[in-house]
Amino acid sequence: MNEKVSEKLKELSRYYFVTREIEQIENRIKELTQISASVMSGMPHSPSVQNQIERYVEEKIKLENLMIEKYSELMEENIRIEEYLKTVKDSEIRMIIRECFIKCRSWDDIAYLMKCSKKVPYMKLSRYLEKKERDEVNDKVR
């Protein structure tokens, strides 16, 4: 696989990785919510416990703001992929790209949807990207 194809796959994968970041942030927010709820329940608190609760709340607010940024980044990546898909004439390739890079499905899941062996979707996409790259290079030469 050539460098340009590898770069395109990396670019398309950004949506996936931002999605995973969002999941991690959501999990940390849930964690902080549970911790602060357990610390806050019960008896009156000393100043050190109160400071700890304040730190949890501050971290939670920072993470919630980060979530807003990540959702914005996710929308931008989604738009970027959809714009790219407008240039793809092959409906099967569009489906592979959407399933893999927007719906974050595994190659095995995509193969199951396509009713083919698990290597086929990846190979079809790789071949498509390689051909597209060759065509672009040939167009520049002309």
Image: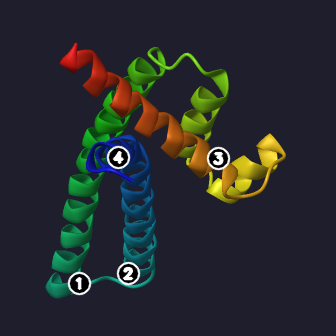
Quadrant, the C terminus: top left
Between circles 2 and 3, the one closer to the viewer is 3
Residue 38, given in percent of the width and then of the height, sits at: 45, 79
Instruction: Identify the image quadrant of residue 98.
Output: top right
Q: Secondary structure at mark 1?
A: helix
Q: Residues within 10 Å of mark 3 (few under 14, many from 20)?
A: many
Sooner in the amino-acid sequence: mark 1 or mark 2: 2
The answer to whether residue 58 shows anywhere in this view is: yes
Q: Which residue is mark 3?
A: 121
The amino acid at mark 4 is Arg
Between circles 3 and 1, the one closer to the viewer is 3
Residue placed furthest toward the right: 115
The answer to whether residue 101 shows anywhere in this view is: no
Q: Secondary structure at mark 4?
A: helix
At horizontal 78% and vertical 41% (from top left) the residue drawn is 114
Q: Which residue is mark 1?
A: 49
In contact (CB < 8 Å): disc 1 and disc 2: yes
At horizontal 56% and vertical 45% (from top left) the residue drawn is 100
Sooner in the amino-acid sequence: mark 2 or mark 3: 2
Which circle marks residue 15 in the picture? none
Taking depth in this image into account, of 4 and 81 the one nearest to the observer is: 4
